[in-house]
Amino acid sequence: MIMRIFQVLVRPGNEKEFSKFFHETAIPLMKRTEGVVQVFPGAARSGSPREFSFVMIWDSLESLKAFVGEDYESPHIDPAEAALVEARSIKHHDLVEL
């Protein structure tokens, strides 16, 4: 299994609009995406009001590529949120099962 950590830094002043997108669009989308075993969305906190993240557990690299394409190591972003986001990052790890 693959752990995908996606982090977003929202442009100043767009926190509320991005939060709405995050809760109403992004989280439901990831929850229903085939190949996603588990989703851990991280909303902004008072000390970091512009930072949001997702930790997603994918059943396989093939499932991840089916969703984002062959260039899975680049942080993909929905066109609806592109203007709201200042920066984004993506990291992948093999999941260590306990």
Image (cartoon, rainbow, N blue to C red):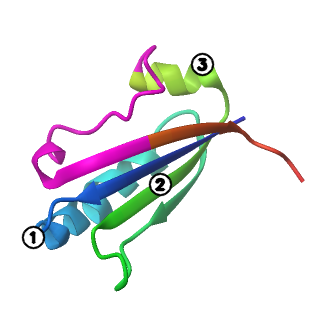
Residue at label 2?
54
Q: Earlier in the sequence, mark 2 or mark 1?
A: 1
Q: Earlier in the sequence, mark 2 or mark 3?
A: 2
Pick the front one: 46 or 81: 46
At numbered mark 2, what does the secondary structure look like: helix, strand or loop? strand
What residue do we see at 14% from left, 67% from top? Answer: 12
Q: Is residue 73 magenta?
A: yes
> Residue 16: x and y, percent?
16, 73
Compared with 45, 55 (above or below) is above
At numbered mark 3, what does the secondary structure look like: helix, strand or loop? helix
**The C terminus, quarter of image:** bottom right
Pick the front one: 36 or 41: 41
Q: Which amino acid type is shown beneath numbered disc 2?
A: Phe
What residue do we see at 39% from left, 70% from top? Answer: 43
The single residue placed furthest to the top in the displayed view is: 70
Residue at label 3?
62
Q: Residues within 10 Å of mark 2 (few under 14, many from 20)?
A: many
Viewer-side label of 2, 1: 1
Q: Which amino acid type is shown beneath numbered disc 1?
A: Gly
Residue 35 quadrant: top right
Q: Which residues are magenta?
A: 69-89
Q: Earlier in the sequence, mark 3 or mark 1?
A: 1
Q: How many marks?
A: 3
